[in-house]
Each structure stands twice: as structure tokens, then as C-alpha cells.
Image: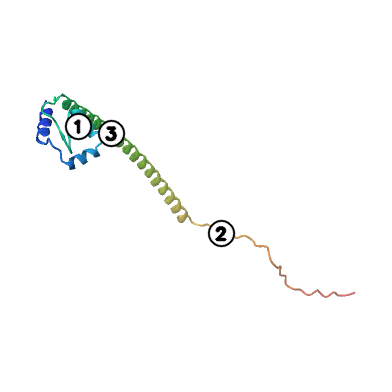
Amino acid sequence: MSKVLIMYCYVITYIYYSTAIDKRLNGVRGALQILSFAGFQVSGEHYVLPETCELSNLVDVVEVFDKKAKDRAEAEAKLQEILAKNNKKAKAEMDKKEAHRKKIRAEQQQAQKEVKDKIIISSKANKINFGMKLKKFEPPKEQRGG
């Protein structure tokens, strides 16, 4: 009931809404319909809550807003929980991939070090057989007798 009393005091204090507030309410989807449901009446550019109006509709509006706010808060909490789980999963996946990359880098560095430190025992060249074949000229031997 205290919310209703606070709302009623607020309404009585601001019976006439300025056009700036009216423009703000037009930006909120369904705000003007809620005001008319709560009992407000349009008087020129202003919305007025008649003194003869019952506050039960206003109480209903407050309850609807409270329920929507509670539902929205629950949905936001669930969303944050799902996001936290997804972030945790993604971080675990990234850590796993980074560990794999470090392992691969270490193996690569080890292989490079082994190749660098390997002592070459012997080198074997291939015999090349192409191009002109040179032979030393030897004059024919003298034949004796004959």
C-alpha cells in the first residue's frame, strides 16, 4: 500500500504534466495507454487524475510495473549467468589452444636446436658427368721392324 500512497502523492503533486513530460511519455511505448488505464484524463495538453477516481487501477498499474521489473531482472540475471558460462568456456578453450601453441613452439625450437647442434661427419659430393670429355693427346708409338 505504501507504493500506492507514494504514487498518489506524486500524482496529486504533479496533477498537470508539462508538455516536456508529455513528449517524454510519447517516446515510451504504451505509456499514454497506461495513464488512461490508471484513470488519467486528457485536459488540453495535460493529463489529470480526477479526485473521484479509484486508486485500484493505479495499484494494478504499479503491480504490473513491479512484475515486469522483476521479470526483467530475472531475465537479466539469467543472461548474465549464461554470458559468464560462455566466457568461462571460451577462456578455457583459448587457454587450451595457447598451451597447444606453446607445446608446438617448444617442439619446433627443440628440432631447430638439434639440427643446429648436429655434427656433420662426412660430406659426399656427386660425380658430375656432363660437358666435354678431355683426354691428354698421346702421339702414336713408333713401330719397329717391319
Q: Element under label 3?
A: helix
Colour convention of the picture: rainbow
Of residue 31 and residue 80, the one placed in the foreground of this image is: 31
Q: Which of the numbered marks, if any, corresponds to residue 75? A: none
Residue bearing mark 3: 81
Vertical placement of residue 93 versus 116, above or below: above
Q: Residue 11 location in percent, x, y?
A: 12, 33
The type of residue carrying mark 3 is: Glu
Dot 2: few (<14), some (14–19), or many (≥20) neighbours within 10 Å? few
The Cα atoms of the two marked residues, 3 and 2, are separated by: 66 Å
Quick one: quadrant of the C terminus? bottom right
**What's under tag 2, amino acid-wise?**
Ser
Kindly state the secondary structure of the residue where label 2 is placed: loop
Q: Are marks 3 and 1 in contact (CB under 8 Å)?
A: no
- Residue 30 location in percent, x, y? 25, 33
Q: CA distance from mark 3 to mark 1?
A: 35 Å
Q: Which residue is painted at 17% across and 31% down in the image?
A: 41
Q: Is residue 99 above or below residue 119?
A: above
* Label whose residue precedes the other's in the sequence (3 or 1): 1
Looking at the rendered image, the disc whose residue lies closer to the viewer, 3 or 1, is: 1
Between 105 and 122, the one lying in front of the other is 105
* Residue that numbered label 2 is attached to: 123
Looking at the image, is mark 2 or mark 1 earlier in the sequence? 1
Q: Which quarter shows the N terminus?
A: top left
Q: Which residue is identified by label 1?
A: 35
| Horizontal relation, residue 97 to residue 146: left or right | left
